[in-house]
Amino acid sequence: MHIHLPKPLHGWRALFNEVGVIVLGILIALTLEQLIVSIHERRIAGEARESIKAEVRENLFWIKQREQREPCIRRRLAELDDLLQLARAGAATPLVHHLGVLPHAKITSLRWEANAQAGRASLFSGEEQRILGNLYFTTEQFRAAQSQEEIIWSKMRFIQGLKQFSPLEAHDLAILLGEVRYQHWVVLLTIHRAQQWAARMQLAAANPVGIEGPPSANAQICEKLTAPFTASDSTSGPDAFAEPGDMP
């Protein structure tokens, strides 16, 4: 039986060639693996980016709906100021039938939070993360101010049907009106800042769902403070979901 022993390498050059082939193979494998990971991460980041941008566009749509009601809200606040001055002076005040309902903007952050918690948002550039973080912080401030504004607005409804203000009722209205004006200022400020951050990413308002339309043209808040209750899209027509008595 013949035993074949391994032949010794002929010099250092042959050794380097063998080692070089092995190292080159490892480098190629690592490069390919990194390329595959990079392609996968880019795809994941792209999907996350589009999901978040869609959410931002929808938030901007709702903010724009609110912004379109601002002329009516400003007039209502001015009317309430005039009413308060009469009440403080002990003068006769006009009868308020219905204060009106503030428009409610549906602000969400579910897609941003889900992608951030899953680590997908970390695949964005540092600048993208900074802008989106500021944008969502701003819309969260808007949502909080809107919530407080609605609570205070509902408390001011005690003036509905009130024929004469007592000094205590005039005082209560003054307190509530001051609070609601502050929250209204925060709402306006956050609308402005949200639009600024969105412009940095070249994002505009869009409603991909297509269900919600433009603000109702016959909203009570756009009527005079002394106007009788008028039906809205929510209390009349084929899409009504409430009765007039259900309105706050």
Image (spheres, grey):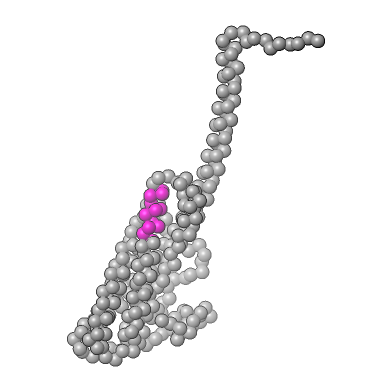
For the point 47% across and 52% down, the residue is 116
Q: Nearer the viewer, residue 193 or 215?
A: 193
Tally the numbered discs: 0
Indicate the quadrant containing the N terminus: top left, top right, bottom left or bottom right.
top right
- Magenta stretch containing residue 240, yes or no? no
Q: At which x and y percent is residue 240?
A: 50, 80
- The kind of secondary structure the magenta stretch mainly shows is helix
Q: Can see residue 221?
A: no
For the point 57% across and 38% down, the residue is 36
Q: At which x and y percent is residue 131?
A: 38, 51
Which stretch did the figure color magenta? Answer: 128-139
Seen as rendered, the residue at the extreme right is 1
Q: Can see residue 16?
A: yes
For the point 33% across and 62% down, the residue is 190
Q: At which x and y percent is residue 147?
A: 38, 70
Corner quadrant of residue 158: bottom left
